[in-house]
Image (tube, rainbow, N blue to C red):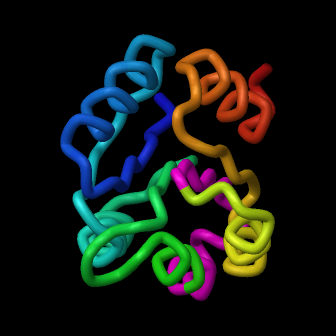
Amino acid sequence: MTKVLIIDDSSLTREFHSHIVKAAGFACVTAADGMEGLEKATAEKFQIILTDVNMQGMDGYEFTRRLRQNPEYDEVPIIIVSTEAKELDKQKGFSAGANLYLVKPTDASRIVESMKLLLGTR
């Protein structure tokens, strides 16, 4: 089963994203910030990652940059889902190594379809 790591400092957003990916048939693990996300990604292998940008400690850009340094994650799709909607924010996400940048609020079907497309299961 495809495992998804969801990183967001909002418990409500983590629950929402967790619910939609589980309903789509994925297994999921959540983390409240980038540092916790890195710890979980080191402990087990995920096939796709959803991360927020604005989080205490380590933000989503830094998380993405650090994760991309791990050879096990150089090809794993990373989707940033953030309220930061400026073109500069998106460019920072792509420069950090994200495959896709979605702006909140986004609907469940868009997230799931994006995940399937990046995983090649659509």
- Give the residue furthest to the front: 86
Q: Quadrant of residue 28?
A: top left
Q: Position of residue 67 (x, y in %)?
A: 52, 77
12 or 114, which is in the foreground?
Answer: 12
Relative to 84, does residue 48 appear above or below in the rendering?
above
Relative to 80, does residue 37 appear above or below in the rendering?
below
Residue drawn at x 45%, y 25% is: 21
Q: Position of residue 19 (x, y in %)?
A: 33, 21
109 or 84, which is in the foreground?
Answer: 84
Residue drawn at x 58%, y 59% is: 84
Q: Position of residue 85 (x, y in %)?
A: 66, 55
Q: Quadrant of residue 80?
A: bottom right
Seen in the image, is 72 located left or right of residue 42? right
Seen in the image, is 28 located left or right of residue 90? left
Seen in the image, is 52 located left or right of residue 98? left
Whether 36 is among the magenta residues is: no
Q: Quadrant of residue 104?
A: top right
Quadrant of the image containing the C terminus: top right
Count of picture labels: 0
Seen in the image, is 21 located left or right of residue 97? left
Q: Position of residue 53 (x, y in %)?
A: 48, 65
Q: Which residues are magenta?
A: 66-83
Residue drawn at x 75%, y 25% is: 121
Relative to 109, does residue 8 appear above or below in the rendering?
below
Whether 73 is among the magenta residues is: yes
Residue drawn at x 74%, y 52% is: 100
